[in-house]
Structures are given as structure tokens and as C-alpha cells.
Image (spheres, helix red, strand yellow):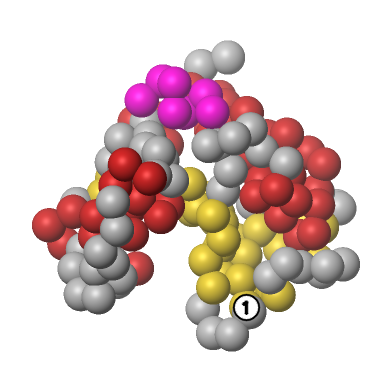
Amino acid sequence: MTKKQLVQDLQTYIGKLMDCETLFFNLCQNADPGKSWKYDLEESDLLSFFSRYSDDMVYKVIIEFENHINAPPFGEKEVLRSILVFKLNPAMLVNEHKPRYDLQDYANGDPARFHILYGDYNYDCFGDVIDPEQLPDLFFQEIYTSLGKAFEKAVLD
């Protein structure tokens, strides 16, 4: 299958009701080391979206739901709203409250490493939304494989 066909395959899950607990544990807990997805909290323990950075921290993939869910989302169900891909622009990221840690302690692709480099950042300033087909081949394949498996296990309708 071409990248375009693979993207279309993932997009068939948009608008589908998901078992968020299954999705959470497949993306965040049961993933290969260094390949797990991060979950972003808005207020308190409400999960807004899952995200994954490329190893070189240039790309960010986000999957969003229609409504917030708890983290972890035990027994919760929610509709998948979107799959977004950003090409990050580090110059646009807010660099306030930057932690002072040693980068050597964190592997490339670790969200903590990204936070060390850029500090707290404004989610509106990720950079440009791009077509998923523009992702580098290896990262695209990792994203497709992890999302495809997780969506297949979590979809309810």
C-alpha cells in the first residue's frame, strides 16, 4: 500500500467510538520501549489528546477525541475527532520555565527531553499542520503500525 492509502486507512477510524482504556494501554503502556505515546492533560486529570514525537523532535503526531476523558481512562468511551501531524518550529515554542536537567539522561523521542529543550510551550504554536504523507518513512511506518494496531483493538462501532 502507498502512504496515501495507509493514511486513508487510519482516517477511517475518525468519528468512531473508541474504548479509551484499551487505546490508552496499547499506546502508552504496552508500546515498545521509546515508542510509547504521551498523554496530554488539560485540567486536573482530564486527558485531551495522545501525542508522539519523532526521534529528532521535528514532528509531532496528535490524536484527539471529541471530549476530554480521565487519565487513565478506565472504562471510558469517546469518539476519535482527528489525527493531526505537525512539523515543529522550535523558534515558535515558548521557552519559559525551562527545566534545568541533563539531556544525556533522556533518549531522543522522549517527551521529557523535548520539555528540557523547550520548556513549557503553547500548544497553539506547534508549527505547521502537514499531511501525514510528509513524515519521514521510518517514523510514518512506526506511527501507522502503532495507531493501526491500537485503533483496531479499541474501536467499538
Q: Is residue 51 left or right of residue 13?
A: left
For label 1, count other residues whose C-alpha is less than 10 Å away and answer few (under 14), some (14-19) or many (20+): some
The amino acid beneath tag 1 is Leu
Which range of residues does the magenta coloring cover? Answer: 136-142
**Which residue lies at the image location 58% right of the left edge and 14% below the top edge?**
1
Task: Tell me where residue 95 sits by quadrant.
Answer: bottom left
Residue 150 location, quadrant: top right
Q: Which residue is drawn at 73% across and 67% down?
A: 72
* Front residue (pair 112, 151): 112
Please identify the residue farthest to the top as the structure is shown: 1
Taken as a whole, is the magenta stretch helix, strand or loop?
A: helix
| Residue 11 percent across, percent down from the top left | 60, 42
Q: Where in the figure is residue 76, as x and y percent of width and height?
A: 82, 69
Q: Can residue 141 be seen in this view?
A: yes
- Identify the residue shown where x is 57% and y is 61%: 39
Magenta span includes 70:
no
Q: Mark 1 points at which residue?
A: 46
